[in-house]
Amino acid sequence: MTPLMHGTSPLTARLEPWMQDLVSNPQLCQKIISKYGSPLNLHHYESMTRNVGELREVATEHEIDFQIYLARKANKTLGAIDKAYAEGCGVDVASFHELEQCLKRGVRAESIIVTAAVKSRALLELAVANNVVLSLDNVDEFRELNERSVESQTPIRVALRLSSTDSEIPATRFGLRAVDWLNLFANREDLSSIEVVGVHFHLNGYSSEQRAKVIYESIQLADELRRQGHNVQFVDMGGGIPMSYLDDEKQWSGFWQLLDELPQGDETLTWKSDRLGANGNRPSNAVYPYYQKLIRGPWLNRILSTRIHDGKQTVAQMLKERGIQLRCEPGRSLLDGCGLTLAEVAFKKKRSDNVGLVGLHMNRTQCRSTSADFLVDPILIKTPNPTLEVSSPYSGFLVGAYCIEEELILRRRFEFPHGIARGDLIAFPNTGGYLMHIVESASHQLPLAKNLRWESGHWLPDGIDEIHVSYGGHSPKTDSLT
C-alpha cells in the first residue's frame, strides 16, 4: 500500500507496534491534539526494556560487571527517569534541575552521575550534599571542589574525565589527558576529602574501535590511580551507542546517491538543493547515521571482544581481572522506540516561485537535534472530517512557525499522493531520544510542546510541563485520554 506521505526519495521509518496503532487511529490523534495543542510529544516507554536487555545480555555473556545510566538530557520527561530506574538503570544528569528531579523521584545517589560540561555552584552543592558522583572535567572544577571539601569536610566522589592521546582519535573539548590528572593528584596532602572512584570519557561518533582504545587508556589510568591509593571502581564510556531508525539500507544509500547526482539548484530532493554537508555520495558527518547495521548489543560485543595492546586479553577480560565495572550513558539508543511527535497542518500554499509548502503548527526546534536534518519519513494522518477541497496529489516542503525564511521543519521534499489539507496531522516517528527536547525553543513566546505518557491504558500528562510552568509554559490538564 502506498503511504499517504513519503520523501521524494523515501526513507521509511521503523515503527513500534504502539506507533502503528496510534497513527491508525485518526480520531484519537485528533482528540489529543485538540486537547493539548500542536505539536505534542507522546511517550511509550516499554521499548526501553528491550533496549536495556540487549546490552545486558552481552555484558552477561562476557561475565563483566556492567551498569547503564540513561542520559537524561536526551529526554526531559519524568517518565523516562521512572522507567530507567524501574529497569535497574542509573541516570546521567547534566544540570541542577535534572539532578534535583531525579532525587525527588527517589533515584538513589549511587545510581546518579553528574556529567555536566559546565557545573553551576548550585549543582555542585546539591551533588556534594547528596554524595552523588561528579565527572570532573578540568582543573578549575577540581579547585572549586577541593575548596568546598576543605570547608565542609564532606567526602566528594569524582570520576576523572579522560581525553585520549591516541592520534587516530579526534581532539575533544572534554576532560584532561591522563598525565595531567596524575600530576594533579600526585602527592597532594589536601585531597583527603576527594575520592577518585572512576574514570569517565566522552567520544563523538559511534566507532566501536575507538571506544575499545579509550577503555584501554582508562584502565591504564585506573591502574596508576590505584597505585596512588585511589579506589577506582568503574570506567564509564559515556554515550554514543548506535541505533537505527530505518530498516532499508538501500533507501539510505540510495538517498545519498541521488543527492550527489542532483544538479545544483534542483529542489527535487531537498530545499534549495541542500547537500546536508555531504561531499560525494556518502552520508555526511553533519547528520546522524539513521541507518546502521551494528547497533546496541552487537556493537557492545565487538568492543568487549577487542584485543588491545599485546593482544593477550580482551577488553572484557581486562575489566574482569581488575574488578572494574563498565558503565555507559546511552540516550538515543535507550529511548529507541519510546517517542513520537504529532503536529497539525495549518496550511498549504505555494512559494513565490510556485514551490509547494505545507505549514505546521510547530517550529523547527521541536523535531531536531544538532544534526543537519531528521532523515526519516513522517506519517500523514488524514483528518476524519476532511475539508471540501479536492484531494489531489501534492508535493512540497514542511515549514514551521518562526518568522524566518529558512524555517524548515525538515529540509527534504515530500510527496502526498492523496493530497494534504488544513487539519490533517503529521506524525514524526521515534523522536524520543534528543529530537524532542535537546534544542527546543519557545521563541516568539510560542509554547513548548506538551508531553504525554502512556500509562495504564491512558495518555496522561507527564508532569514535567507543570514543573516548567515558571519558564513560560502552561500547565496541562490532568484528565486522561484512552
Image (cartoon, grey):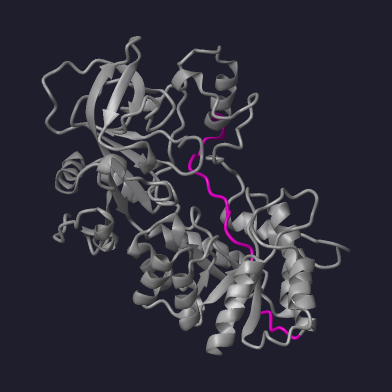
Whether residue 318 appears in this view of the structure is: no
Question: Where does residue 46 sit, x and y in percent of width and height?
Answer: 37, 60
Q: Is residue 273 above or below residue 180?
A: above
Side of 8 where 231 appears, left or right: right
In terms of depth relative to the viewer, which is nearer, 161 or 207? Answer: 161
Quarter of the rendering containing residue 232 = bottom right
Q: Is residue 472 above or below residue 193?
A: above
Give the tally of numbered discs. 0
Side of 182 where 72 appears, left or right: left
In terms of depth relative to the viewer, which is nearer, 230 or 382? Answer: 230
User: Which residue is located at x 37 percent, y 33 percent?
Assistant: 409
Question: Where does residue 344 sit, x and y in percent of width and height?
Answer: 23, 36
Q: Which residues are magenta?
A: 229-250
Question: Where is the N terminus found, in terms of image quarters?
Answer: top left
- Majority secondary structure of the magenta segment? loop
Residue 62 covered by magenta stretch: no
Question: Where does residue 116 sit, x and y in percent of width and height?
Answer: 52, 63
User: Which residue is located at x 38 percent, y 58 percent?
Assistant: 76
Side of 201 where 84 appears, left or right: left
Whether residue 80 appears in this view of the structure is: yes
User: Which residue is located at x 62 percent, y 48 percent?
Assistant: 294
Question: Where does residue 313 sit, x and y in percent of width and height?
Answer: 81, 68
User: Which residue is located at x 81 percent, y 61 percent?
Assistant: 308
Q: Is residue 183 above or below residue 427?
A: below
